[in-house]
Image (spheres, rainbow, N blue to C red):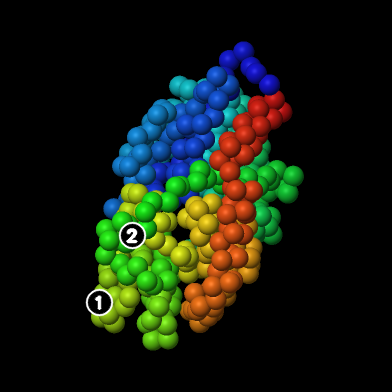
């Protein structure tokens, strides 16, 4: 349905660090029909241990930066950021404000509530912080705040069914407000493996297990290190690549050097095609996840995954078909890795299933169409 003027959408996220939310937002901002939708992205800056997504990707859409809008809590800066968000709303006069992740979700939705004219509000949970991040008392405060804001939110988006169920179980919003939209990914073409192997200086005859992501406590880098230690002792055919950065980087490097672990640490890598071209499987050892984009990027390239069964990872990994879901401990993860690396028939089957499920569930075209349909429906409601 076309409109006389485009539907104005103000999109807010605290920062565009490398990861799933940044990729999804960029796809929406770049690919949605510009004749029907006018969009502005409001965002802050990354922290010192994070990599800015726009360092590698030059946006072809409007980005308004608020320097005070960051991930850490600072009462003065947060108040300034809130007032600047409110100013953006007054200037742009959006039909829809779409917030992403926790902090921006609070600031953006409160600003909409205080704005004198009615604005349709959409909020996306790319994961949640109901466990694994904060002590119980702080988590309960967050849940209470999310419950209140949910009453003002017209539509709540989650990136997976499990995240949706967790939020509803916590009493955050009515089920009728929820919509699950899986991320959409464009397939990354593989490069010549021998060239990438030479560039990274890694063994070509090993089973390459790759971790890509932020090196933070919630990702349980300590658990990943335990898996690597077990592999060194029990299976010399397994070799690990770690790509990313964060506060756990020093711990990882120290452990690799101390125990002479079979790991190549690459830091942040701008060309994911090089990583995909050398990897046999992707691995996640987290205590909490949303719907990890790296696993989806692996599936569409035919790379199976091994991950702890947390968040909405089960929306990506169909257990024992295109990957393996494990308990949140190093023994379970290593057993899965040992089985997949030593069973060629199983591995080849997983590769085919990964390609099929990646194409069926996570196409970028379907993702864009789902959001365009959502915005039109919300605008007309």
Q: Position of residue 87 (x, y in %)?
A: 43, 27
Observer-nearest residue: 31 or 40?
31
Q: Residue furthest top?
A: 4
Residue drawn at the location 42% of the way across and 51% of the way down:
190
Residue drawn at the location 55% of the way across and 69% of the way down:
347
Q: Position of residue 12 (x, y in %)?
A: 47, 37
Q: Position of residue 353 (x, y in %)?
A: 61, 59
Dot 2 lies on which element? helix
Q: Position of residue 147 (x, y in %)?
A: 63, 50
Dot 1 lies on which element? helix
**Quadrant (top left, top right, bottom left, bottom right) of the C terminus:** top right
Q: Which residue is mark 1?
A: 257
Category of crowding for the residue at label 1, using alpha-carbon neighbours closer than 10 angstroms: few (below 14), some (14–19), many (at least 20): few
**Quadrant (top left, top right, bottom left, bottom right) of the N terminus:** top right
Q: Position of 327 compared to 271: left or right?
A: right
Of label 1 and label 2, which has the lower sequence position? 2
Q: Position of 105 compared to 160: left or right?
A: left
Observer-nearest residue: 155 or 339?
339
Q: CA distance from mark 1 to mark 2?
A: 26 Å
* Figure check: 352 above or below 62: below
Category of crowding for the residue at label 2, using alpha-carbon neighbours closer than 10 angstroms: few (below 14), some (14–19), many (at least 20): few
In the picture, residue 112 is in which quadrant? top right
Q: Position of 178 compared to 308: left or right?
A: right
* Figure check: 118 above or below 265: above
**Residue 205 visible to the viewer:** yes
Q: Which residue is mark 2?
A: 194
Observer-nearest residue: 95 or 307?
307
Residue drawn at the location 62% of the way across and 54% of the way down:
357
Residue drawn at the location 40% of the way across and 29% of the way down:
60
């Amino acid at each position: 349905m076309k409109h006389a003027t485009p539907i104005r959408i103000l999109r807010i996220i605290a920062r565009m660090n490398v990861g799933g939310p940044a990729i999804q937002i960029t796809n929406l901002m770049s690919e949605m029909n510009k004749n029907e939708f006018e969009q502005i992205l409001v965002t802050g800056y990354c922290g010192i241990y994070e990599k800015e997504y726009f360092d590698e990707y030059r946006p072809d859409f409007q980005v308004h930066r608020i320097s005070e809008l960051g991930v850490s809590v600072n009462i003065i800066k947060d108040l300034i950021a809130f007032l600047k968000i409110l100013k953006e709303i007054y200037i742009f006069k959006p039909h829809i404000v779409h917030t992403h992740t926790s902090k921006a979700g609070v600031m953006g939705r409160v600003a909409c509530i205080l704005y004198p004219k009615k604005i349709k509000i959409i909020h996306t949970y790319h994961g949640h912080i109901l466990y694994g991040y904060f002590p119980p008392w702080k988590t309960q405060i967050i849940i209470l705040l999310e419950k209140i804001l949910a009453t003002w939110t017209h539509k709540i988006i989650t990136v997976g069914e499990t995240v949706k169920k967790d939020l509803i179980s916590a009493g955050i919003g009515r089920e009728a407000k929820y919509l699950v939209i899986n991320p959409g990914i464009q397939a990354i073409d593989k490069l010549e493996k021998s060239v990438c192997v030479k560039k990274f200086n890694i063994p070509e005859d090993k089973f390459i297990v790759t971790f890509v992501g932020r090196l933070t406590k919630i990702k349980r880098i300590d658990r990943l290190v335990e898996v690597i230690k077990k592999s060194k002792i029990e299976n010399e055919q397994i070799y690990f690549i770690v790509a990313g950065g964060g506060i756990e980087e020093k711990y990882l490097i120290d452990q690799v050097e101390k125990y002479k672990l079979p790991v190549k640490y690459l830091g942040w890598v701008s060309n994911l095609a090089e990583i995909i071209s050398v990897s046999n499987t992707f691995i996640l050892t987290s205590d909490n996840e949303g719907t990890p984009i790296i696993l989806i990027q692996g599936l569409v390239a035919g790379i199976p995954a091994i991950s702890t069964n947390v968040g909405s990872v089960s929306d990506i990994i169909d257990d024992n078909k295109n990957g393996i879901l494990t308990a949140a401990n190093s023994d379970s993860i290593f057993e899965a890795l040992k089985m997949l690396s030593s069973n060629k028939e199983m591995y080849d089957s997983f590769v085919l299933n990964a390609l099929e499920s990646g194409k069926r569930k996570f196409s970028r075209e379907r993702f864009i169409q789902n959001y365009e349909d959502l915005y039109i429906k919300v605008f007309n409601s």
